[in-house]
Amino acid sequence: MVRIMTDSQRVDSSSGLNLFFHGCGSGGHLSLGSAAATVEQQGTPLLLIDCGPGTLASFQQRYQCLPPALFISHAHMDHIADLEILTVRARLAGVAPIPLFVPLSIITTLHQRLATYPGTMAEGDHNFWQAFQLLPVTDGFIWQQRQWQIHATRHHAPGSSYALHLAGTLFYSGDTRPIPEVMAHCLKGGERLFHDCGLHANPSHTGLEDLAREYPETLRQQLVLYHYANEQDGEQLRQAGYQVARPGDCFALGASQA
């Protein structure tokens, strides 16, 4: 059994950063939304993580603007589909190309899925990439004077999905099977740990039984779980003693959460 963190630990971190969940589902349940979250500082968005169906509407409702930058963890449509809408809205709004941080190994898949359709806009004269500043990422990137790192995870195929890591502040697993070797060697201490977990495991995702087998209790106590199938599964994860993200939750980041 692990302890559940209290609601008072969800906001006002000493780092000044929070993580807001636009959605926390696995793509199959509308009320949960697609798993996506924004790193924000005092209510101002800094970086949107993934952009699946419904993410952009949630983002604009909360912040009344378009994302200032995005990181894409992998190229499954439940994590990238709203980029098609975003490219059009950015063009119509006349905003400068939006920085888009993409792990190098998934750029080809992203391009094939979203950027090869002819006539992105009915008015013509628009290419998907015109709305974005594509920034390929190998090991990490600098954004907002912070050093962000990425780590390959275990999802469907090697080199197809990546975790996002801000040392001492945030670890967001993206879609993954358990990654104890990454957690053991890459965490610096103080990170808030957000981890893919459904009730049942499959070849691409962590299941509840995986957690106790793969992770020590001290680490399990720090996990916030997301990317589960439905509300009932989320409740069972909570009953097992874990903190579970819901759409609209905002979690404080950094060492004050240890």
Image (cartoon, helix red, strand yellow):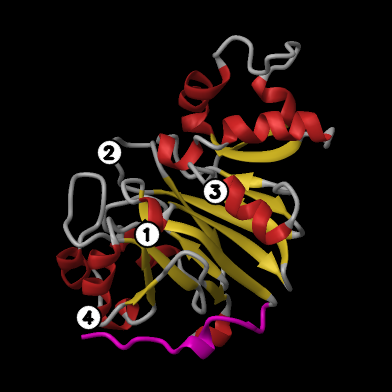
Q: Residue at x 61, y 33 (%)?
A: 85
Query: In terms of sequence position, does the residue under pointer 4 or pointer 2 come before the other?
Result: 2
Residue 106, percent from left and from top: 47, 31
Q: Is residue 168 above or below residue 137?
A: below
Q: Nearer the viewer, mark 4 or mark 1?
A: 4
Q: Is 11 a magenta residue?
A: yes
Measure how far apart labels 3 and 4 are at the Cα level: 28 Å
| Quadrant location, the N terminus | bottom left
User: What range is drawn magenta here?
Assistant: 1-15
Q: Main secondary structure of the magenta part?
A: loop
Residue 126, percent from left and from top: 73, 16
Query: In terms of sequence position, does the residue under pointer 4 or pointer 1 come before the other?
Result: 1
Circle 3 sits in a helix, a strand or a loop, which is it?
Answer: helix
Circle 2 sits in a helix, a strand or a loop, which is it?
Answer: loop
Question: Is residue 234 toward the left or the right of residue 34 in the image?
Answer: left
**What numbered label is drawn on residue 156?**
2
Q: Nearer the viewer, mark 4 or mark 2?
A: 4
User: What kind of residue is marked 4?
Assistant: Gln
Q: Residue at x 69, y 17 (%)?
A: 127
**What numbered label is drawn on residue 239?**
4
Query: In terms of sequence position, does the residue under pointer 2 or pointer 3 come before the other?
Result: 3
Measure how far apart labels 4 and 1 are at the Cα level: 27 Å
What is the quadrant of residue 156 in the picture? top left
Q: Residue at x 36, y 46 (%)?
A: 27
Measure how far apart labels 3 and 1 are at the Cα level: 28 Å
Q: Which residue is mark 1?
A: 182
Q: Which residue is mark 3?
A: 55
